[in-house]
Image: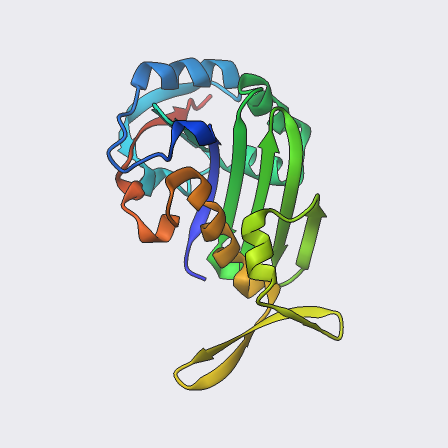
């Protein structure tokens, strides 16, 4: 695993995928941050998804496109996967939308995702190398079913076997977490996030004001 991410996607399947050339509405970004009410942030500069995908603690990135929105914030993303109350403010702002939260941290094979629709938490799953799968809520999504179908369970442990350079390798659930996250990202971009140019998308960068 080599990616790090803390991202919230708000989208409408009928609107089509967010593309690498989708225009960003800076005024709409200001409107969203005022509704989030997660601290006193100021609009710092125009940035891009490549920088925003894994924000620092004092950073918040917002992208507003005709097809949907991207919000990058570490605390909110974790709250979305864990189902914490802090995430309710995001659901309240977009009550009739689909929301997909994705988190990755390559150092410990941490992965997580959560799917909300029309204000309801439908599915959530997360795991890491140290803890295994520690969140499992709801029924698997279609993208997950396709990946689970390629696995097998041995002595209570789910594994995937792949032939690499002529040798059969075994992968645990945490090692496959990134693959699950990338497959789910197709819902937003039409293709896997690691196989597209969407990291060039414009976003507004907001910084938390220091006391």
Task: Tell me: residue 180, above or below residue 123.
Answer: below
Q: Residue furthest left?
A: 21
Q: As rendered, which of 36 and 172 lies closer to the eye?
A: 172
Q: Is residue 54 left or right of residue 134?
A: left
Q: Position of residue 157 (x, y in %)?
A: 70, 70
Q: Is residue 21 above or below residue 40?
A: below
Work out whether residue 41 or residue 124 is closer to the camera in this orientation and state it.
Answer: 124
Residue displayed at 45% across by 18% down: 33
Query: Residue 85 appears in which quarter of the rendering?
Result: top right
Q: How is the image coloured?
A: rainbow
Which image quarter holds the N terminus?
Answer: bottom left
Residue 152 appears in the rendering: yes
Residue 181 spot, x, y in % from top left = 50, 51
Quarter of the image where one finds residue 88: top right
**What residue appears at the point 30 percent right and 42 percent down from the top-left corner?**
199
Query: Which residue in the rendered view is the most extreme toward the right?
Result: 155
Asked if residue 129 shows in the view, the reply is: no
Which residue does the image show at 44% across and 50% down from the upper left? Answer: 4
Q: Position of residue 165 (x, y in %)?
A: 39, 83
Asked if residue 106 lies left or right of residue 129, the reply is: left
Above or below: residue 69 compared with residue 125: above
59 relative position to 141: left or right: left
Please name the residue shown 75% across and 70% down the image.
156
Residue 2 at x, y = what percent? 41, 60
Please give the count of numbered marks on the rendered protein. 0
105, 58: nearer the viewer: 105
User: Which residue ends up furthest to the front in the rendered image?
Assistant: 14
Residue extending farthest to the bottom is: 166
């Amino acid at each position: 695993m080599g990616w790090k991410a803390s991202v919230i996607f708000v989208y409408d399947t009928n609107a089509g995928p967010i593309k690498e050339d989708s225009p960003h509405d800076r005024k709409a970004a200001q409107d969203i941050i005022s509704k989030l009410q997660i601290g006193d942030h100021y609009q710092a500069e125009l940035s891009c998804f490549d920088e925003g995908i894994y924000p620092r603690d004092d950073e918040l990135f917002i992208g507003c496109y005709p097809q949907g929105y991207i919000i990058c914030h570490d605390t909110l993303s974790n709250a979305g996967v864990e189902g914490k109350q802090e995430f309710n403010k995001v659901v309240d702002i977009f009550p009739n939308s689909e929301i997909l939260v994705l988190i990755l941290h390559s150092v410990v094979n941490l992965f997580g995702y959560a799917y909300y629709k029309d204000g309801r938490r439908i599915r959530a799953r997360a795991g890491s190398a140290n803890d295994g799968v520690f969140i499992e809520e709801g029924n698997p999504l279609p993208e997950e079913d396709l990946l689970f179908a390629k696995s097998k369970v041995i002595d209570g442990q789910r594994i995937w076997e792949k032939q690499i350079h002529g040798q059969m390798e075994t992968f645990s659930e945490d090692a496959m977490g990134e693959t699950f996250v990338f497959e789910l990202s197709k819902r937003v971009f039409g293709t896997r996030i690691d196989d597209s140019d969407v990291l060039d998308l414009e976003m507004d960068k907001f910084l938390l004001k220091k006391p």
